[in-house]
Image: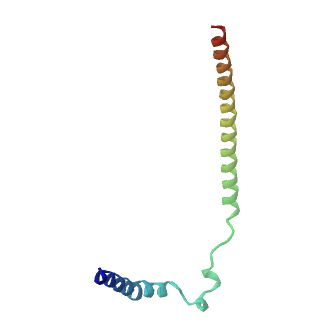
Amino acid sequence: MNNLLFTALLIALLYYFCYYLPSQKKLNPDPTKLTHSVFTQTEPTPNTTENEIDNLKEQLKAKDQKIKELSEVENQVDQLIKNVQALNNEL
């Protein structure tokens, strides 16, 4: 059992030092080499924002309509329940 644990630890250390650590060093570029052209855009273009806002407004209107429909259905169900209860009381 100790031999198996030692072997697993040895494999883990070899993986870390021979594979994982060198690949991590390659991913981190030298920060002095960065120029302004490398930076990403932080603000979206105005057209994209307007389109997204319009889409969100349409989704909001659709959801509001669905909520109104569901509340009407809820009122109808409540009325039906009251009617059934009234019929049960008559019997």
24 on left or right of 84: left
8 on left or right of 63: left
Q: Nearer the viewer, residue 70 or 11?
A: 11
Q: At 33% across and 85% down in the image, what residue appears?
A: 6
Total labels drawn:
0
Residue 27 at x, y percent in the picture: 49, 83
From the image, which quarter does the N terminus lie in?
Answer: bottom left
31 on left or right of 9: right
From the image, which quarter does the C terminus lie in?
Answer: top right
Residue 50 at x, y percent in the picture: 70, 56
Residue 43 at x, y percent in the picture: 69, 68
Residue that protrudes farthest toward the front in the picture: 1
Q: Please determine whether, in this image, residue 76 is positioned above or below residue 91.
A: below
Q: Nearer the viewer, residue 63 or 55?
A: 63
Which image quarter: residue 67? top right
7 on left or right of 73: left
Q: At 56% across and 90% down in the image, what residue appears?
A: 30
Q: At 66% across and 31% down in the image, what residue appears?
A: 69
Q: Please determine whether, in this image, residue 44 is positioned above or below residue 56.
A: below
Q: Nearer the viewer, residue 56 or 14?
A: 14
Q: Nearer the viewer, residue 32 or 74?
A: 74
